[in-house]
Amino acid sequence: MTNGTQAQEMYYTRAGNGPVVVLLHGFPDSGRIWSRVADELKNSFTLLIPDLPGSGNSPLAAPTSLADMAAGIKQILDKEGITKAIIAGHSMGGYVALAFARLYPACVAGLSLIHSSPMADDDEKVKLRLKTIELIQMGGKESFIKQMTANLFAPGYASAHPGVVAEKTAMGLSMSDEGMINFYRAMIHRADNRAVVHEAAYPVQWVLGSEDALIDYRKILKECHQSYINFVTLYIGCGHISTIENPEMLVADLREFCNYCCPNRS
Ligand code: MLT
C-alpha cells in the first residue's frame, strides 16, 4: 500500500529478453491488444503485459482506482525483481502509466503515452461518462460498445476493415458491466498529471493520431514539449488505436524510444 492506494493483484504475461517494458492496455481491452506489437518487440525487450483488474484474466475483486492499478504494477515489478522499467500505456493504460510515474518516479526509465493524455476529464467528459455508466446499468452495454468501437478507428480505416471493427467490438463486449463501470469511475476520478510529465526526469514519448476522435492531438501538442526529453509523433490518418491501425509504425517508434531509454543495454 502507498499513499492510501490498495494494490490489486493482476494476471500478466512475461516474454522476451532485455530491458523491461511494461505494456498497459486501454478501455475496453485486455493485454491481448498488444499481441502484434509484442511479437516484434520481444526479441529485444522483456515485456510485462498485465490484464488490468476487470479485464481479460484479471477479476475485479473490489473498486479499483487508477492509482490502485499502478500499485498493482509495482507489485508485479517487485515480484519479478525489477527496479526500473519503461512504462508504456495506450489511452487508459497511459492514465495508469502516469499514475505509476506519479507514485514511483524512481522506477521509471521512460514513459510512453500512446493516444493518451495527462489531463484529467473536464466537466463535459465527466457528464458523458456518468451517462454511459447509467446506460450500462440499464442494460445498454452493447449499444455503447458498438458506437464507441466505431469511433476508435479513423473513418477510412473502419469502412475498409469491417471485420477488424467487428472483432474489436466482440473483444469489448466480453468485458463485464462491473468491469466497465469500474474503469469509467476510475477515469472520472483520475488526477491531472501534467506536472508529472513537465517534471519528468526520464524521456517521455507521445504517439498521436490526426483522426483520433477521443484524444484531440492539438490539445496534447501544447503539453508535450514541456518535459526534458520528448519523442513526439503524429500519425497522419490514424485514429485512436495505432496498435491495430498502424502497428508497424508503432513498433518502430516504440523500439526507437525504448532503445534511447536504455543506452547501456548489453
Ligand atoms: C481508452 O481508449 O482507453 C479510453 O476510451 C480512454 C478514455 O475513455 O478516456
Image: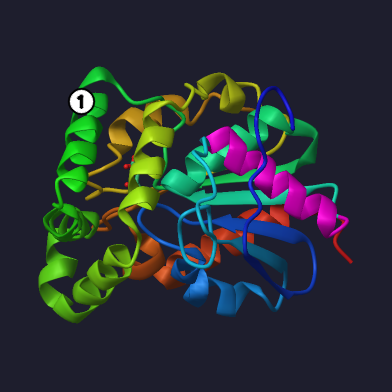
Provide residue 17's location: percent of width, then percent of height.
78, 73
In this rendering, does residue 71 appear at all?
yes
Q: Quadrant of ligand 1?
A: top left
Q: What's the residue at 47%, 71% (across, down)?
A: 32
Disc 1 is placed on an element classified as helix
Provide residue 72's location: percent of width, then percent of height.
67, 46
Q: What's the residue at 71%, 52% (across, down)?
A: 260
Q: How many marks do you count on the picture?
A: 1
In this view, the residue in front, 155 or 92, is 92
In this rendering, does residue 230 appear at all?
no
Residue 176: within the magenta? Answer: no
Q: How is the image coloured?
A: rainbow
| Residue corresponding to mark 1 | 127
| Residue 158 in the figure: left or right of residue 13 | left
Provide residue 167's location: percent of width, then percent of height.
26, 76
Vertical order, 231 against 188 (above or below)? below
| Residue 9 in the figure: left or right of residue 178 | right
| Residue 238 in the figure: left or right of residue 9 | left
Q: Is mark 1 within 8 Å of ligand 1?
A: no
The quarter in which the C terminus is drawn is: bottom right
Q: What's the residue at 47%, 66% (across, down)?
A: 56
Vertical order, 27 against 39 (above or below)? above
Q: Which residues are magenta?
A: 66-81
Q: What's the residue at 20%, 25% (across, down)?
A: 127
Other residues around mark 1 within 10 Å, as few (<14) / some (14–19) / many (≥20): few
Provide residue 169's location: percent of width, then percent of height.
23, 68
Please name the amino acid that badge 1 sits on. Lys
